[in-house]
Each structure stands twice: as structure tokens, then as C-alpha cells.
Amino acid sequence: MGAAEHRRRLVSLAYPVYFELLAGVTAGIINMAWVARLGGGAVAAVAVATNVENLLLGVILVAGSGTTVLVARARGAEDSAAIRSAVRGGWVLWALVTPLVAIGGYLCREPLAHLVLGGSGGSGSGSGSGDSLPLATAYFSIALPGIAVFFATNVVDGILKGAGDTRTPMKLAILANGLILGLDPLFILRFDLGVRGAAIATVLGRTVALICGFVVLHRNGVLRQAAQAAPNRAGSLSADARRTAETGLPMSADFVARMVGALALVAIVARIGVSEVAAYGIATKAMYVATMAFYAIRQAASIRTAQLLGAGRDERRAIGRQVLLLAGSLGLTALLTLLAAAPWIMWAFGSEGEVAEAGALYLRCLGPYLTLLACFIALGGVFEGSGGSPALARITACGVALQLALAYSLSGSGLPGICLAMALAMALQCAAIARMYRRTEHPTATDCDDRGVRISVTEPDSLSPDNRFA
């Protein structure tokens, strides 16, 4: 298959994922914009609750991401029974994980609120900051049981993406955000429910979108055929769940490692000064516009690679080249944009004075890191789709640890030192993944898929449906 065709397929899969990811970030911004009328305490409560939800996303990624890869692999093989097993595995994991998080989180909502707010929520003055703890607890009392809907939506999205449909998850995310935008003022202000109203609006908006997602799943021809697959070709529920967990766990670990590293980096930046912390926080939000594009390409590469391997075609090298071309172009575009427009970006986020100055400097120094990050994140999709995600997760974990150590050492140079630490650590991660990629140029006689099943990569015709999904 030609390079142009690979590139077209990747773009077709990636752009809906990009808008879906941006829509997910927007939900938290919508809530914060409406609760801002209730005072600083309410804003703090919703802000920390949103951060907790982002971290919990890493939990369900085990099911969502694992299901995407396995469904894509089975679809490429045109194996309906394997699709059925992959879908069942995702839902079994959802059923196992969700009660622990939803019920456990609800029962521990007050200690959790105290943990994430620290000492800032229990006392204070002005702007309602002393009310943050009870407000966060109130938000958690609705949002944590409602996490079941959020988790189910992630599994639905994973199934649809594995089946090659990335547009429906985008439409569902936009629908949910549109409903949240309309329901927020109704529940927060009209019904005078405050932060509880924001949580209720979020859960209701996502519930409607989830129902629509189930309708789409039911109408999908590939999935309907898989649901009718012969039962004697489907494994046990525990085996299905184990395969999904083995596939998705490294991807989840990769995500959680980056989230934890980002939170730890805030503490290091805090050693420099208050203005720098504020500038770092604003600049990080501005970076989402670029980084979400990198992750969109990653998901597209994962789906495409898994589909072709399922069909017995090892085209990792060709896909990787197109991924690097797309991601590298986006990274360089981000670099040039930040160099030219950094002050205006900070102004657009409402910053001024020392914060705006520090943020503009940080954004201008961030370009090399973003370019390297684009290549690493996007190329990682090739390995996620071909069973290399455990090695990828190890590279990420080591890279995050190195980044924090370097950032601590270079923090004396201010935010430019932080950027240098991030770029150096990412350069080493890129070197490691480049080594993995070069190994695909001379594949061995056998390789292992994402579940440890040995498959041929030099003789694609030997990949019969039976041994692909043994």
C-alpha cells in the first residue's frame, strides 16, 4: 500500500479523535466558567475535582484502549468471534473496575476532597476559599457515582474506534458538551444547586451521549455480526477480560506516568516563584491545542497498525514514516507559532504583568520539547497497535523520572531551565523509541502480539484467523 494511502487513512482516523479530545477538555472549562459566579471556593472545588477525574481516566483506559486494539486487530482479520471476545473483555473490565471507583469514591468523598485540596480548603479568607472542602465533597458526591457513565462512554468509544469509526465518538463528545453548556446555568443558577448542579449537568449530558452511543453500537453492521458469532468460538469471560487487561494496562500505565509527572513538575516549578507557577499552569492549558493533536495521531496509528497486522500485513515501517511526517510537521508548526505568538496566547488566557511575561518566555522555550514530544507520542501508536506498549510504558516511566531529576537540578535557571530539562529527557525517550523502530526494519522470524501469542512477521500469509486469536 502506498505512502499517500497510509497518510490519508491516518488523517481520516485522527482528525475526529482530535476534536473528541478537545471536547473532553472543554467540559471542565465549561463547568468552571459557570461556577466562577459562585466564588473562588467553588472554582477551586471544581478545578481539583476535574483533575481527579483526569487521573481516573487512566484507570478505565485499561478497558478502553485495550478494546480498541483488540477489536481493530480482529476486524483486520475479519474474525467476528474475536471481535465479540474483545468487546466482552472490555465490558467485563468495566464491570469489575467501576463499582470500586464509583462506590469506593463516594464513600471516601470527604477524605478525598481533603487530600486533593490539602490545607487550602479548610480555612482561608476571601472569595469563599474556606468553603472549598465542603464544596469539593458535594461535587464528588455526584461526580464519583456518575463516573460509571464516564467509564462506560470510554468503553463505547474504544469499541467504535477499533471498528474504524472515530467520527461517532467525536459527535458524542460534542453532544455531551452541548448539553452540559445548556444544563449548567439551569442547575447551577436557576435551581440554585451550586457545584452539585455542575456535577448533575455533567452526568446528565454524558448519560444522553452514552445512550446515543449504545444506539450506534446496536446499528453497527460489523459489531452486530460479531454479536451473533458462534458461542463455541468465544472464550470464557475471564479469558476475554485478561486479554483486554494485558493489552490495555501498559497504555494506561503510560498515561498515568505522564499525569503523575506533570503534577510533580508543578511542585518543582513552585520552587522558582508564584508567578512562574501561574504562568506554567496557563501555558500548560494552551499546550493542549497541540498535544491533543499528537495523541490523535497516536490513536490513529494504533488502530491502523492493529488492523493491518490482523489482516496479516506487517506495514509498521510504512505507517511509522507517515506518522513521523504528520507529527513532525505539527510539532514544527507549534514551535513556530509559540515563537511568534507567545505573548498573545498568554493575553488570550487573561494573564498580565509578571505572569504574562514568564508565560511568554516559557512558551517560546518550549518549542524543541513539543517537536520531540510530537514524534514520540505519535510513533508510540505504531507500537501500541503491534504489541510493543509494555516497552513503550517503560520508556515513558524512565523518561518522566529523568525529566523530574533534571528539572530539579536546572530549576535555578528558571522556566528556561525547566524547558531544557523537558527537552533533554524527551530527546532520550525519542532515541529509545527510534531504536525500537529500527528493529522493525529487520524483523526476526517470529514476534509476539499484544497478548503474548507468537505471530510471523516475515510470512504474513501464515496468519490464519485461528492462530491470530488463539
Image (cartoon, rainbow, N blue to C red):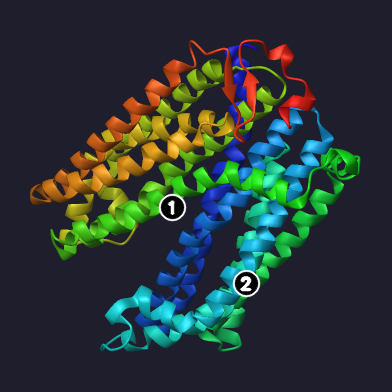
Which amino acid type is shown beneath numbered disc 1?
A: Val
Please give the name of the residue rendered at 14% of the width and 61% of the height, measured from the top-left corner. 271
Q: Quadrant of residue 370?
A: top left
Name the quadrant of the N terminus. Answer: top right
For the question of whether residue 361 can be seen, the reply is: no
Q: Establish if 78 lies above or below 50.
A: above
Q: Establish if 467 lies above or below 181.
A: above
Q: Disc 2 vs disc 1: Cβ atoms closer than 8 Å?
A: no
Q: Which residue is mark 1?
A: 256
Q: Position of residue 315 (x, y in %)?
A: 59, 17
Q: Nearer the viewer, residue 84 or 54?
A: 84
Q: Which residue is mark 2?
A: 146
Q: Establish if 251 lies above or below 106.
A: above
Is residue 44 found left or right of 67 in the rendered image? left
Is residue 157 found left or right of 439 in the rendered image? right
Task: Count neighbours of disc 1 (C-alpha within 10 A) and say few if under 14, some if 14 to 19, many if 20 or more.
Answer: many
Which amino acid type is shown beneath numbered disc 2?
A: Gly
Please give the name of the residue rendered at 30% of the width and 52% of the height, measured from the top-left corner. 283
Is residue 108 found left or right of 417 in the rendered image? right
Q: Position of residue 110 (x, y in %)?
A: 45, 84
Name the quadrant of the C terminus. Answer: top right
